[in-house]
Amino acid sequence: MNYTLDFTPVINGLPSLLAACLGTLGLAVGGMVLAIIIGIGGVILRDSPIRPVRWLVKAFVELIRNTPFLVQIFFIYFALPLAGLRLDPTPTAIIALGINGGAYAIEIIRGGVQSISKGQVEAGLALGLHKSQVFRLIVLKPALRAIYPSLTSQFILLTLTTSVASAIAAYELTSVAQRIESDSFRSFEVYGAVTLFYLVMSWLLMSIFGLIQSRYFSYPVK
Amino acid sequence: MTHSTLSRRHVLLGASAALAAPALLTRPALAITPAEIKSRGKLVIGIQGDNPPFGFVNTSGKQEGLDADVGELFARELGVTVEFVPLAVANRIPALTAGRVDILFATMAMLPERAKAVQFSKPYVANYITLVAPKATLVKANADMGKLAIGVPRASVQDTQVTKNAPEGTTIRRFDDDAATIQALLSGQVQAVGGNMFYVQRLNAAKPDTFEDKLEFTRLYNGACTRLGEKEINAAANAFIDKIVANGELAKIYAKWIKVPMPTFPASVEGVSFTVS
Amino acid sequence: MGLNEFIFLLVGLKWTVFLSAIGFACGGITGLGVALARTSGIPVLERVTAGYIALFQGTPLLMQLFVVYYGLALMGLRLDAWVAVAIGFTLHASAYLGEIWRGAIEAVPRGQTEAAKALSLKYVSRMKDVILPQALRISLPATIGFLVQLIKGTSLAAIVGFTELARAGSIVSNQIFEPLTVFGIVGALYFAMCWPLSLYGAHLESRFAAATR
């Protein structure tokens, strides 16, 4: 038996694959926004004066970071309905991605905030800067600058993780690829091509993140 | 941090590496014959791991079911030991064509479009494909499916049938396997599923007296599958199926797993050839 | 959930541990080669390995597993499913570990290399005796962090149809119809493997941070 590569199914399926890329990016962006919200909220609650709240945030971070995303998304989709919470695949995927990314974001943002030493704030005030100026120039900007690379690489990872959402039949690139694969039986060709699609999407996101970095978070050059 | 940032230039390098990879892959996969299987002493069978009573891994980790019993008989016929490779529904044909398994006894229904990708043997199982829903759900005709979210195992016959019969715009959710599909109906994530003759039995085991067959889409026959053009192993499978149909061994397996009398199998199925031409 | 079901999960767990161990060990050996090539100073080698790393860090693990799983078979290699999956994880791990260790090698102060050269140490001994021991220490928290990612990542072998812990969970959940319990237990088993590693990694990180302050 000879196996010759045949990319016809990929070419014929191009419109639906490209549309599915938008589905993937939609899940990714939704997940990122939710992750940032959870990240910032988590950092604030982590320093709460109420001990059980601090403890809960820590437990959340450890729990999410030490269990697989596939199990998390299965749990939300198949098990939570029995507890009365039923969501469609796409919201489930965004929430699962947001929760997963959020747990990492909490740790990353906390690291950034801690990197600002008290002395710098005091120095800023001593130089006669206004409180809002101190916050903007001495706390916020350096903190964002410090966390930006980690946060964005976490977001790239989150984008790649969207492929796991195919397991709950969410609309994204992997599930559409699986559909084309099962119609054509051209597994290697379809998955190989789709891998390239993901690579292009990663590249695109990295370019955007890089652009934002050079515009807003680069170190001043003198 | 575990993950360092990539540079964009490197991604382009990665892309060119990925583009170069297919060049390495145009070598032919090896064909297999019964003689080779005998000299190797082992038959590798692709089977379902989660679809009782056809093929499933029991909780002690042993492969069981009608397909497993038929497969074991075939290995005994060849005088070799058997190795079962449990496959997800959508992985069955790729696993065969890619050479991961020698033959499929994997609830493979005979469909003309599949016959273009694999070689079917003569039939050894009859099955019907239905829409399964809770009794309270009102479904009388195909058009009623339009308002439901329907789950199916991706790339299964249920998938083909539901996709074909449901009205335009029906929400069809495709899962990786039967397990996830059944779970989706039990969790209420879908209101109906495309099932086979055993779905109702399995679903009602979880929630007694809740589910029933609503529509029958089609009656299907399952065969063993080998790669296209592999004459010897297809001939061996056909001779084996003729034998177990004639000597009553298949009827015994039928009684054990399916609990209905073995049907008479058709001599031909439209659009499907049982032998290598 | 009965004892039988729990034992079935433990058999799945065994495969998860096994796949993680193979992926980490083989990926570690290959990854060291990748890291050394990436820092070799030879432009061709550096570019090729940079592309290799970018390819694996820029695509989903699930796709990598699919492509390796079907690609190897098309190359005429008939491998057991677990071997094919293990090769997928090895390649994945080698790229990530290669990148982590490249960072660590470059984090060793340049003066160390220059001093070693001044002492006329050859490349092998310079790396083995001077640079790598320090790089290993620097990279340890990130390496352990990646091991945790890898253990969690083995769950995706389930989607290829391989019965490890996550798929064992899905099968059991379908037999006893208690997804809350089953996925809860599966999650707890992963947690029991990953958490101690995470804690150890965090401990090392804070110790190193304190040492460099």
Image (cartoon, coloured by chain):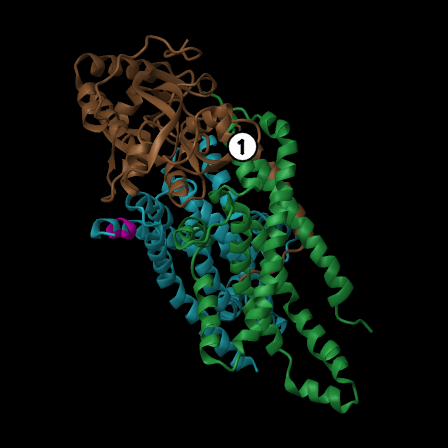
Residue B80 seen in the current view: no
| A43 horizontally vs A123: left or right | left
**Residue type for callout 1:** Thr
Extent of the magenta region: C6-10
Which sits in the foreground, C63 or B230?
C63
Q: Which residue is mark 1?
A: B170
| Snapshot quadrant of residue A41 | bottom right
Q: Which chain is cyan?
A: C
Chain coloured brown in the rendered structure = B
In magenta segment, residue C9: yes
Q: Residues within 10 Å of mark 1 (few under 14, many from 20)?
A: some
- Please state the horizontal and vertical placement of residue B97, each as a whole percent of the image: 43, 26
Drawing shade for chain A: green
Q: Position of residue B82 (x, y in %)?
A: 25, 30
For the C terminus of chain B, the image quarter is: top left
Q: Main secondary structure of the magenta part?
A: helix
User: Most extreme residue toward the bottom, as rendered?
Assistant: A126
Q: Secondary structure beneath disc 1? A: loop
- x and y percent of residue C133 in the render? 48, 69
Q: Can you say whether B122 is above or below C212 in the image?
A: above
* Residue A73 part of the magenta segment: no
Q: Is residue C64 above or below residue C22?
A: above
State the residue at coordinates (44%, 29%).
B139
Name the residue at the right extreme.
Answer: A222
Residue A130: x and y in percent read 78, 85
Quarter occupied by residue C193: bottom left
Q: Is residue A195 left or right of residue A219?
A: left
